[in-house]
Image (cartoon, grey):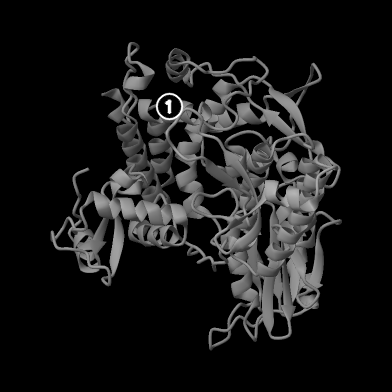
Amino acid sequence: MNGTRVSGAPIDQHLHWHDINWAKCTCAVKRHQARIVKATQEGKWGKVKSLQHLLTRSFSAKALAVKRVTENRGKNTAGVDGTTWSTPAAKMKAVNSLKHNGYKPLPLKRVAIPKSNGKERLLGIPTMKDRAMQALHLLALEPVSETLADSNSYGFRPARSTADAMGQCFRVLSQKGSARWVLEGDISACFDDIKHEWLIDNVPTNKTILGKWLKSGVIDKGNLFATEKGTPQGGIISPTLANMTLDGLQKVVEGVIPRTTRRGQNVAKVNFVRYADDFIITGGSKEILENEIKPAVVEFFKSRGLTLSKEKTKITHVTEGFDFLGQNVRRYGEKVLIKPSTKSVKSIKIKIREILNGNKQATAENLIRMLNPILRGWANYHRHIVSSKIFSSIDKFIWEQLWQWSKRRHPKKSSTWVKNKYFHTYGSRNWVFSAEISKTGLNMPNKWLRLVNLTSISIQRHVKIKGNANPFDPTWEDYFDKRLMSLMKKSLKGKAKLTSIWKNQEGNCPICNLKIAQDEKWDIHHKIRKVDGGSDNVTNLVMLHLNCHRQTHSQDYRMSS
């Protein structure tokens, strides 16, 4: 099938969207991306360019690009042409339309999104075709960006999260001899101010196509405005372009002051952590940060057309604490504790109150369905830090709000009646806000829908990803296998997945055919490597004895899928 080819083979015009073999397409693209990584590591930029050219002309990559833009959250959001690709025929036609000769992107559609500080974030929404072209070229650019990226940057990168960024913050600030001063950095309108000339000169991608995207213009309230600088928020490739613009800052910062003595110590205690356009830099003194580090940062940004925000950039002592990514980092005596920030706690309380006040006539079931995703998402974000007391205080706040909501609905009923209607006992917990879901017509007992209790969500320390880990590099395959296993063991969904894998192989190791005993150590192994297009689905995962796993990798053994 043409979907297995990476070279620029002609596309079968009669191929149906649902006939595409997505596994083979993914494998073909992943193998090609691994070659791009190797060429980048070797500094063979001519070969990188050639490989990128082949990839962006391949059927497999084009199909995956269209698949991405038609399955993400913006799939129903049209650009200035009003077009969306909702049918299989339209998607297949879109794949055939992704040609480079004669390609001209349309202007962006301006959309304003309110921010928490009362200001607006201006998004530029490309058309579906332009989004697909960006997704296509991102497949060829991302292996390069991941290979060249700063080791301590974490935003808008695969396999990295805010938890990794906060883990690095804790690592560089928690020791007895760690830095006591922090430069909190924020870039003014990062996406909007990046110099186009710098991007075209320094980003290893198709220069012609990139230039067309950057200069496509914006339509706002029916008027066309030229874009002379910046990369629009809303474009699929924009976060990667912004990351590549900021990559290199870590090297500059850590090179300002000689980092080591003969004993290998970081004398100035300068460390760097970045998530998107927010970053912190630690230092041994306020003077080092103010007089030496900050000027170097300003100079680095200047060549890229960027400036530091005077409002948000400041130097803070760790005993005062600082907010970073919605969490507060502060030293208390000899301990550094990371907690949900006051702003984040206030925000979740406001959201809860708004839902309750705006749905006074809603049923308990509907109310729970509205609250649970918000509560679970907020708690999961903060579950890796010191959150137990705050979780408990929010649970109390929610109970108080729900009690008022319940009493207001039934002003003529007694408190006992209200409690019995809305609050029930579940296990060892009392006063659980619940709703009975009727199974009318089925010979099944009714089920209960319960409100999430934040204190029931376990607090677990997150293991930070290794700085140089690259998901596109085959040499990191074993590391990501072990990391996946560790993360699965810590979540309920992950544990259920492990149980399913174990049952699928009947408790036996598929290499030695011996039982995997309960007290034995084991690893998770991908039948088809992720760098070759394999997924994290149960069908592509097996449990192996530790020695069998080592044997598998040493012999470059490939298991049949």
Q: What residue is rendered at 24% in x and 49% in y?
A: 504
Q: What residue is rendered at 62% in x and 52% in y?
A: 452
Q: Seen in the image, is 539 located left or right of residue 492?
A: left
Q: Secondary structure at mark 1?
A: helix
Q: Quadrant of the C terminus?
A: top left
Where's residue 420, x and y in %? 69, 50
Q: What residue is rendered at 43% in x and 16% in y?
A: 88
Where's residue 140, x and y in %? 45, 38
Q: Is residue 401 above or below residue 460?
A: above
Q: Is residue 302 visible?
A: no
Q: Which residue is mark 1?
A: 62
Please rate how many residues cluster around mark 1, counting C-alpha atoms within 10 Å: few if below 14, some from 14 to 19, many from 20: many
Farthest top residue in view? 14
Where's residue 284, x and y in %? 72, 80
Farthest bottom residue in view? 263
Q: Is residue 330 visible?
A: yes
Q: Quadrant of the N terminus?
A: top left
Quarter of the image for residue 311 reads bottom right
**Quick one: 137 or 173, which is closer to the camera?**
173
Q: Is residue 48 above or below residue 260?
A: above
Quarter of the image for residue 470 reads bottom left
